[in-house]
Amino acid sequence: GVSSARNTGIKNARGKYISLLDQDDMWFPNKLLLQVTFMEENQHLGGVLCGFSLSRFVNGIQKPIGNVLTNDLDRLTSGWLSFRGNGGLICSTMLFRNSELPIYFDSTFSHVSDLDFFLRFQSVYELGYLEEILVYYNQHRNQMHTLSSELLKEYPLLIGSLELRK
């Protein structure tokens, strides 16, 4: 699954930074340059998120429908936890250090694996936020986090598995 594939990539990464790109999203051309520069200037951070443009493909053409741009990480997390979509915590927006103590995706989850990853990452590393729109996040009806009944099944397992500081 997706979690196992991401973990294989994280385990085999040799660069200083790791950034994930979901198959239905697109990076702006300057995403990596801006995020790496930000991380070099903020050595205390374990990773950085950025804003994104919500879009849909209509007849093969990408149509922007809005932007998500907030540096309030608690608000982004609460969006997930209160079933308001993914709250803005999109794996395609993140760049993080290739660390000696890596955080991996829990492959026992399918629908909340991203949320689980972000919660565990934030419990170990400080995340920064680059206030730039650098990703197209393409919305469609088959996205895992929009399948509410499946999310409801995994939420109790997620909450039970986490040791959260907050």
Image (cartoon, helix red, strand yellow):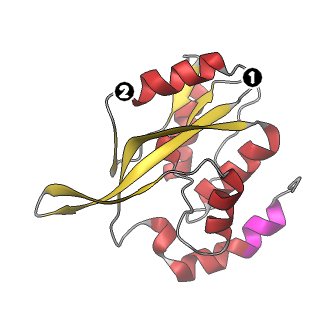
Q: Does residue 157 belong to the magenta stretch?
A: yes
Where residue 159 sits: x, y (%)? 79, 67
Q: CA distance from mark 2 to mark 1?
A: 27 Å
What's the residue type where badge 1 is placed? Glu
Q: Answer above or below: position of 9 versus 123.
A: above
* Quarter of the image that includes the C terminus: bottom right
- Residue 155 or residue 76, whichever sits in front: 76
What's the residue type where badge 2 is placed? Asn
Where residue 73 sits: x, y (%)? 67, 51
Q: Secondary structure at mark 2?
A: loop
Q: Residues within 10 Å of mark 1 (few under 14, many from 20)?
A: few
Where residue 15 sits: x, y (%)? 54, 16
Badge 2 vs badge 1, beta-carbon distance below 8 Å: no
Tell me the residue that label 2 is attached to: 30
- Residue 8 or residue 101, whichever sits in front: 101
- Asked where in the image residue 140 lies, by quadrant, the reply is bottom left
- Asked where in the image residue 163 lies, by quadrant, the reply is bottom right
Disc 2 versus disc 1: nearer the observer: 2
Circle nearer the N terminus (2, 1): 2
Q: Is residue 108 visible?
A: no
Tell me the residue that label 1 is attached to: 100
Image: magenta residue range: 156-161
Where residue 40 sits: x, y (%)? 61, 16
- Residue 21 or residue 64, whichever sits in front: 64
Q: Residue at x 60, y 75 (%)?
A: 83
Magenta-drawn stretch, dominant element (helix, strand or loop): helix
Q: Return the residue found at the far bottom.
A: 149
Q: Does residue 160 belong to the magenta stretch?
A: yes
Q: Secondary structure at mark 1?
A: loop
